[in-house]
Amino acid sequence: MASIDYYKVLGITKNASEADIKKAYRKLARKYHPDLNPNDKTAEKNFKEINEANEVLSNPENRKKYDKYGEHWQNGEAYEQDKQRQQEHQNRSQSNQSGYSQEDFSDIFGDMFGGGASSGRRTNAKFRGQDYNSEIQLHLKDVYETQKQVITVNGKNIRITIPAGVENGQVIKIKGHGGVGVNGGPNGDLYIQFSIVNNTKFKRDKDNLYLDVDLDVYTALLGGQLMVDTFDGKVKLTIKPETENGAKVKLKGKGFPKYRKEGQFGDLYITYQLKIPTKLSEKEIELIKELQKQR
């Protein structure tokens, strides 16, 4: 890992909250995104550092390790475990001949993290690479169908498949696309959280959709037909006579795709909102009065 101050990269203090970290990351990611800064090497470098900082600080466990071990946070915990095991061995031994000295521990720490080494002992222990965290922001219409997308994580382009039906806040794991393992250890994993922005008139609850539809009073009283929107087109509905305000109908299979269930959809629930006419003509007023008398 590069010797950089992740807090400084995001422009936050060490006591920043998770919300502060997310806000700072989003702001800077938009500012330095490669799509907005084509052929700008400085922006590209900043974007990589921003992602690297966010991947560490947005994960509470990784942040705790970083605060304790700094740039060596990935393997600092393993060093402590190694040191503890050796201490236990020393306690069981009748002499210090088989134990490590303080200098030996310094050598182990340096060897683990690529620092200077003396003639002390070395470790060949394998350590798993760090997990990476990333966030993808999409619109609701973007996840109505399965799509492929290329994302940049820690300077590497990764092509991923985003299944239809992904929910807001959902996290998926891409195995082996995290940090490189140490001494031949396995790579970490990549965790991607989805932020789904709904800028449609539909409300979503998992794989069901909900829509309010205006219904004029005449059609509500006499019945008729009405064209209404679904997420993938329009359908014609038959309105029953004397339909009340707030009446609901269900359109089976016209909802949102079910996650990882190809070809399966939720339902669309429509609620009729009765619209009272305004700016009535004299003739309309007369007719309504006549109707009132009949009732």
Image: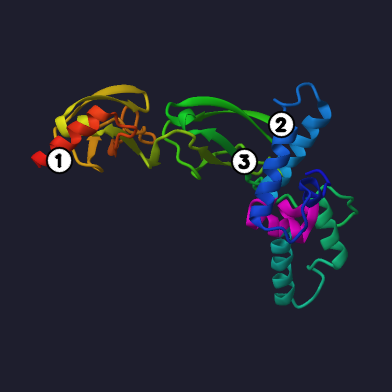
Dividing the picture into quadrants, the one containing residue 13 is bottom right
Q: Where is residue 195 in the image (x, y as percent from the top left)?
A: 54, 40
Q: As rendered, which of 51 and 245 lies closer to the eye? A: 245
| SS under mark 1 | helix
| SS under mark 2 | loop
Is residue 78 visible in the rendered image? The answer is no
The residue that label 2 is drawn on is 33
The residue that label 3 is drawn on is 134
Depth-wise, is mark 1 or mark 2 nearer the camera? Answer: 1
Dividing the picture into quadrants, the one containing residue 16 is bottom right
Q: Where is residue 68 in the image (x, y as percent from the top left)?
A: 76, 61
Q: As rendered, which of 24 and 55 lies closer to the eye? A: 24
Kind of residue indicated by mark 1? Gln
| SS under mark 3 | strand
Q: Quadrant of the C terminus?
A: top left
> Do labels 1 and 2 touch, CB within 8 Å?
no
Q: Distance between the residues labelled 3 and 1?
A: 64 Å
Q: Tell me which segment is drawn in magenta.
A: 57-75
Q: Does the magenta stretch include residue 11?
A: no
Question: Residue, x 37% and y 28% (percent of image)?
Answer: 231
